[in-house]
């Protein structure tokens, strides 16, 4: 069973992998995002070890159409998305929650959990992700 998270943002606000990695560490997540990829063109499994253990997620970047912006009720400036797809391994959830929440916070984007029908604002994304991780551990 897979689980997806999607961050919607303005393409020009997409950070470099190095800045993104640093922000994940600064936010207190035990996650090490791989920094050797192009954020706009990379597609596939992205390594993102958790506490030194192998982990990661499927990464898919895409353009967001004006129709999608309207349908999903996103900010009008939204033109880019990053989808994080994970499997059943618990460390994949940790890496995806950390990476997606920090990306949303850094880019003033929104973090969407399609399975729960939830949309989380940039200023709440990191605390939301940490709450999700706490619930998953319980």
Image (cartoon, rainbow, N blue to C red):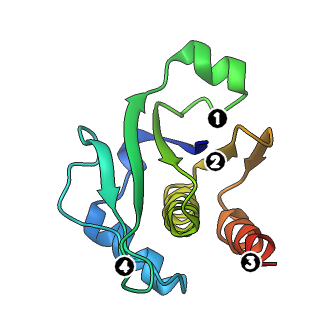
Circle 4 residues within 10 Å: few <14, some 14–19, many ≥20: some
Q: Secondary structure at mark 2?
A: strand
**x%, y% of residue 96?**
52, 60
Q: CA distance from mark 3 to mark 1?
A: 33 Å
Element marked by disc 1: loop
Residue bearing mark 1? 75
Identify the residue at image location x=67%, y=32%: 74
Q: Which residue is mark 4?
A: 22
Q: CA distance from mark 1 to mark 4?
A: 26 Å
Residue indicated by mark 2: 110
Labels 1, 4: front one: 4
Badge 3 element: helix
In this view, which residue lies farthest toward the top? 67
Q: Residue at x 28, y 60 (%)?
A: 16
At x 56%, y 56%, the residue is 104
Give the quadrant of the N terminus: top right
Q: Which residue is mark 3?
A: 137
Q: State the image coordinates of residue 113 (x, y, percent, origin top left).
A: 70, 45
Crowd rating for badge 3 (residues with CA inside 10 Å; few <14, some 14–19, many 20+): few
Q: Counting residues from the N terminus, which is met first, the one under dot 1 or under dot 4?
A: 4
């Amino acid at each position: 069973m897979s689980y997806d998270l999607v961050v919607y943002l303005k393409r020009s606000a997409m950070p470099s992998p190095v800045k993104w990695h640093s922000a994940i560490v600064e936010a207190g997540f035990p996650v090490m995002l791989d920094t050797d990829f192009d954020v706009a063109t990379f597609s596939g499994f992205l390594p993102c070890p958790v506490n030194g253990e192998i982990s990661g997620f499927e990464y898919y970047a895409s353009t967001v159409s004006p129709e999608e912006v309207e349908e999903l009720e996103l900010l009008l400036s939204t033109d880019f998305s990053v989808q994080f797809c994970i499997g059943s391994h618990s460390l994949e959830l940790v890496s995806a929650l950390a990476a997606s929440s920090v990306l949303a916070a850094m880019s003033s984007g929104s973090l969407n959990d399609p399975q729960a029908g939830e949309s989380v604002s940039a200023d709440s994304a990191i605390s939301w992700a940490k709450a999700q991780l706490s619930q998953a551990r319980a």
